Image: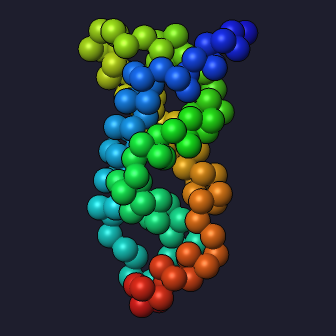
Amino acid sequence: MIDSRLLAEYSRQQSVRDRNYVGLLLWAAARAAEPIPATRPDPAWIRIRVMAERIPQAPDNYAQRSIPYFLQHPPTRDRIGALLDPHNEPAMEDALNDLVQEAIEDFMPRFAVAEVGSGQIAQWLAEYGF
């Protein structure tokens, strides 16, 4: 069982914020670089794309707001001690960076639903000629 004090510390630890900040920026860059489909994309794809375009504009904001989503990811909770440690060995840091990316891939569809409404989807479709 995870100590609730460690879960609470997760949101306050600078090393966690730094990892999540970088992870979100890397995720956003990869998604924003994907080509726009030739045919009308579905709303889920658009939500992800909109988030990829927004995150670089306010990465601190999204790093903080996404912390509860990271904590919903069981492997993140399982590695909480290593995530709280700002002085991991390089191999562990690489593994944690992979874990952060895995968590983002897992929660971003839910996060995007909460962040991107139907009006924003319609606006995106209009802007891109769909």
Q: Is the residue 125 above or below the residue 29 in the image?
A: below
Residue at (63, 35) in percent of width and height: 68
Residue at (43, 30) in percent of width and height: 17
**Does residue 22 appear left or right of residue 6 in this picture?**
left
Q: Position of residue 97 (x, y in %)?
A: 37, 28
Quarter residue 5 falls in:
top right
**Colour option used:** rainbow
Residue at (40, 21) in percent of width and height: 15
Quarter residue 57 falls in:
bottom left
Q: Is the residue 109 above or below the residue 116 in the image?
A: above
Q: Position of residue 107 (x, y in %)?
A: 58, 44
**Does residue 14 appear left or right of residue 93 in this picture?**
right
Using the rendered image of the protein, determine whether residue 27 is visible from the camera's viewpoint. Answer: no
Q: How many marks?
A: 0
Q: Nearer the viewer, residue 19 or 104?
A: 19
Quarter residue 117 falls in:
bottom right
Q: Please state, as top left, top right, bottom left or bottom right, where the N terminus lies in the image.
A: top right
Residue at (33, 19) in percent of width and height: 93
Q: Nearer the viewer, residue 101 or 15?
A: 15
Q: Position of residue 30 (x, y in %)?
A: 32, 53
**Does residue 40 appear left or right of residue 86 in this picture?**
right
Q: Position of residue 64 (x, y in %)?
A: 51, 38
Using the rendered image of the protein, determine whether residue 88 is visible from the camera's viewpoint. Answer: yes
